[in-house]
Amino acid sequence: MTIRVAVIGAGVMGADHARIIASDLPGAELRWICDADPARARSVADATGARHATQDPGAAIAADDVDAVLIASPDPTHADLVLACLRAGKPVLCEKPLAPSSAECLRVLQAESDLGRRLVQVGYMRRFDPPYVEMKARRAQPGLGAPIMMHNFHRNVSAPTHFTGQMAITNSAPHEFDIARFVLDTEYSAVSAFQPSGLAPGHGVGPVFMVLRTVAGQLVNIEINNNAGYGFDVRCELVCEHGAITLHAPSRTETHLHLGATTDYALDWRPHFAQAYRLQDLAWLRSIECGIPAGASVWDGYVSSCTAERAVEALQSGREVEIRYMERPAIYAAQPFG
Amino acid sequence: MTIRVAVIGAGVMGADHARIIASDLPGAELRWICDADPARARSVADATGARHATQDPGAAIAADDVDAVLIASPDPTHADLVLACLRAGKPVLCEKPLAPSSAECLRVLQAESDLGRRLVQVGYMRRFDPPYVEMKARRAQPGLGAPIMMHNFHRNVSAPTHFTGQMAITNSAPHEFDIARFVLDTEYSAVSAFQPSGLAPGHGVGPVFMVLRTVAGQLVNIEINNNAGYGFDVRCELVCEHGAITLHAPSRTETHLHLGATTDYALDWRPHFAQAYRLQDLAWLRSIECGIPAGASVWDGYVSSCTAERAVEALQSGREVEIRYMERPAIYAAQPFG
Amino acid sequence: MTIRVAVIGAGVMGADHARIIASDLPGAELRWICDADPARARSVADATGARHATQDPGAAIAADDVDAVLIASPDPTHADLVLACLRAGKPVLCEKPLAPSSAECLRVLQAESDLGRRLVQVGYMRRFDPPYVEMKARRAQPGLGAPIMMHNFHRNVSAPTHFTGQMAITNSAPHEFDIARFVLDTEYSAVSAFQPSGLAPGHGVGPVFMVLRTVAGQLVNIEINNNAGYGFDVRCELVCEHGAITLHAPSRTETHLHLGATTDYALDWRPHFAQAYRLQDLAWLRSIECGIPAGASVWDGYVSSCTAERAVEALQSGREVEIRYMERPAIYAAQPFG
Amino acid sequence: MTIRVAVIGAGVMGADHARIIASDLPGAELRWICDADPARARSVADATGARHATQDPGAAIAADDVDAVLIASPDPTHADLVLACLRAGKPVLCEKPLAPSSAECLRVLQAESDLGRRLVQVGYMRRFDPPYVEMKARRAQPGLGAPIMMHNFHRNVSAPTHFTGQMAITNSAPHEFDIARFVLDTEYSAVSAFQPSGLAPGHGVGPVFMVLRTVAGQLVNIEINNNAGYGFDVRCELVCEHGAITLHAPSRTETHLHLGATTDYALDWRPHFAQAYRLQDLAWLRSIECGIPAGASVWDGYVSSCTAERAVEALQSGREVEIRYMERPAIYAAQPFG
């Protein structure tokens, strides 16, 4: 069975997904590339061998030779495009976030819920990252006991100068919100947020540090550091009652030179999470083949957006903010995490 | 010049200090061992070659053949013993805490301030731990930029069953409060405290997680995990504007066996900080010889106690609590951190 | 373009290749599974969706719906099967070794040389292992200088009891012989071999340690330890004139438990080299599509066998043995390493 | 009991020992500094508070106020100075090597043997280095089995341009010869030696690689790389029948900057082995106090010199060379390794 795919959005993420689907996965055929910029659509189509390039996402979604849609267009367009896919009854993998606001997420949630079956996977690719998958599997290792705390560190080399603490929370933190829920199998109940002050003029936004509580009583601590400077770095530690599990940084070689032993950091997330993206897209194709949803759902997309909104509130108010979600619709009830 | 020392308190810490002074440091002679339990005093005196064993700390402090006093007796006795040393005009190294309450610390502060010169060193030995010393030295490395955040993790194998979150803060956290101030060269202005709930019955006290703000605007995050289970583990990361410095766990060998590569954790702080204790006691002797105070001062002891009291308040109230210290007396003004 | 593949040999390696080709690579279709044991052929065909299962390799090689052949049958059958593929003019990926003896390798070399173009890739998959690829790429890093020595360690959990030092050399060492040539871009000129004695009765074969010289004057040291006991472990260090590069063990998480921090070793080569096998098979498919050979050639297969034969001689004689290869045929002349 | 010490030789090593004895050890008093250069002797005496500076080693050895002698003068003077100490009946710690040739070592061996008791400790300080001590202690760990192979790597930043492979063996390798015997508790029976060729002009001497056999059948592999360029680096792995133990590089912090995570190497052996030197000198003082010899003996000094001579022969001849030692005199018979 070959799944014919349209990719909507031909920017950095879209081009990468197009490359993965066209040349690194079995059972897929890349048919359409859609972008607001026709030259960009054409260029990615040429590079990947996709037959059609278009500016019209509706045409791509509706096309007879498209079985499934991958959305990597600008965030504000996500919800409407996903809704169009749902109307067309076509499976869709939507890059995170599902939508910039929880209200928009709810529109999608309502639509999929009405449809009565899950067609949407949200691109929280860390759920397929081998180190996180191993961490989750080892949680059950005899002797460790239950998880009680999780430390998460997300660091980028630099962010655009207009970036703010609020954007750190709505843009970067959702990855952390999602993966911690995934590893812990639980939901959040409260969030506090802190930010250092006094950074050098011109430094750009400083780190945001959040402490979340889960309904199971755990603490989830998250550092979002978009101007960390030294490299793309994601760390994680799961602290259990009698032991702990730490994520290992991906590293292939060590260089011994000039009085130092050095391992490298990537410049951005792509080399760091290359395997995660490929395995995510592969799992998506397989989930379409076998009809069993995989990865993050619309519910997970909604939860991340909603959590981010409360975290922004916590940062602005300086107080711990309670988190409440709507009741989980039945079609997401049996959802296995992962 | 040989400094003749009395050690007051012959428990685990006192016996260790007695051994260091008697057989691992130049220029010192261990003369008196004092303990409420005469058999224990005698036993440590015999093991270390100290001439006198006594139950009476006043006698040891006043003795003609005692130049300096090391206090390692139970915490509630510290302040009065230090005050006795100040009255006798003898230099003293007092195990942390200086006193269980900031009010008592203030009594000592007042007395030493009245004396007009520093005679007291408080036993925050991490200031002499080579990894922390190196971290502080590297702070100034070109390119790193100013420190903006510090992550501190303090983990013990287990705590007595009666241990509470409040005790974690007053007992273990002062080491973290002190070392972060030392590395950052600043004071705290606020503290929040969190604790996971829902631990298995019988687990003992769960971790306390604190977020402190410094007057320079930095965030200092501290995990105190007295029932970590897996080993004695202290970690630290200093996050700067353009890079970071992490502390390395002390480790001498790695064993490859049974499908694993394993490095060991110590059971408690003694092997982990053995060098720090020796170097602290050595620095104390040298500071007596040359008359220039070293290590943590009474001011530092007061600050730790005061910070702990605010942190307990934060834990109990669930709110961020402002931290204010008294004005720093003149004799501590020029105090170099370190 | 879809390449239709026959896999000959349905043992551990063949089944793994069949799985990779059928479900983890784009542009391939697995058509035939051949094995001397018809039940085994059938079982792998069923698991992977291959259309045909057969006992007759000739039929699979000759089949109209087979574009390319992957040989993973027992070593002594390799040369004849490769020759049959050459006669059929079909590209072939042959598991290492190309043949158990250099004399047989020469038969294949002659045949492919007569054909005048390269159709055969030999399964030295480490050339596609990301850490080795990175090591080779970093060789040219400014400041390191030229490579002068290479340390290689190959460790398995255990070998069959009948295993001997000679078998360690002919069976396991070729991977090391090949990857060191690949990283260094040179050939060997001499080899010495050593083996510890006095192992506990019943331990199985002890390690073989070899020191090779290259024509460029470098030393290549190789430990083959087939009964290392603790895990599957491959290490490598490239020592250059002014620095060194070490390979990092693949590791995703670290577990902190029972007074130790532990990373895991795999039980065998499959998890360790999973990416290398996939990338090798992908490179093979792409090399067929574009007509440019990739990976190790028949020449490389011959060199490994020849080197192993001299190393066995060195082990038996206790002396350094000179290594001479036949002149490299023209079709391998322009061969880029890697 | 205070031991009054004379240090002979006020170069880098002598000055370092003088500093350790004067200000970092209990129970010692540094009295005499002797050097062929009177200004240098005076300068070190002034820096350490030694009472006397002299050019005459005989005067220092004979002085009434000298209980023990530490020899750190040029290698060719060692044997005669040690013999003078033996005649004076004074305990002596002699820097390695005991003498540049095994013949001279035998003169000392004969003299001490005639005396009938051990007065000489040879400065193989690695026997007191905590990582090696831990490695030796862990050898007996259940499950590891007997040691069968040991890999040793010795790397300096750079050597003088006149340095040769022979000098690498006689100068640096003795540390490795000694520590491997110490860890393994056995003697050598044969040695092979290799050297890469073709290094860039002006690079200086390239590494020497040796393979030694022990009488117990183990292999001991040693790389001596005096122009490693990148830093002072000593590595060691003990391979046992069912597992392995590796030495950990001493490292206190890690710096994350400019796309790399870096730990530092020292420029030379002093920071790396600072603890080893201090603990060695401390053990020497204690051995004098209690009358029980510690550390490496004259026998060990002889064995290292003798092994180095055979290794030079192996390097020159290109063949494996048998190693035979004289019969071990009775006073070294019961010598515990370590």
Image (cartoon, coloured by chain):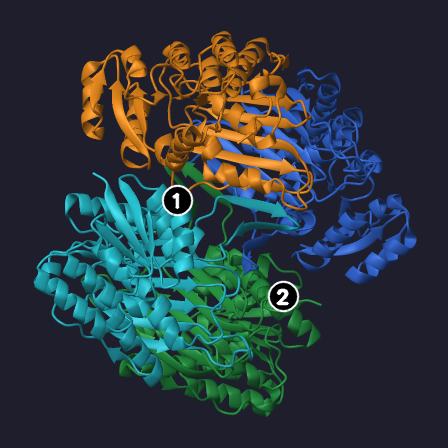
Chain colours: A orange, B blue, C cyan, D green
Q: Which residue is mark 2?
A: D141
Image quarter (top left, top right, bottom left or bottom right) of the C terminus of chain B = top right
| Label 1: chain letter | A
Query: Could you say which disc has been placed on residue A263 in the image?
Result: 1
In x, y percent, where is residue C95?
Answer: 30, 60
In x, y percent, where is residue C149?
Answer: 30, 63
Image quarter (top left, top right, bottom left or bottom right) of the N terminus of chain B = bottom right
For the point 49% across and 29% down, which residue is it?
A292
User: What is the crowding at mark 2: few (fewer than 14 residues within 10 Å), some, or many (at least 20)?
Assistant: few
Q: Identify the amino acid type marked 1.
A: Thr
User: What is the crowding at mark 1: few (fewer than 14 residues within 10 Å), some, or many (at least 20)?
Assistant: many
Q: Nearer the viewer, residue B324 or A253?
A: A253
In x, y percent, where is residue C249?
Answer: 43, 52
On screen, residue B80 versus residue B169, left or right, reads right
On screen, residue D316 versus residue C328, left or right, reads right
For the point 82% across and 47% down, which residue is it?
B9
Q: Identify the amino acid type marked 2.
A: Gln
Task: Answer yes or no: are tags 2 and 1 on the same subunit.
Answer: no
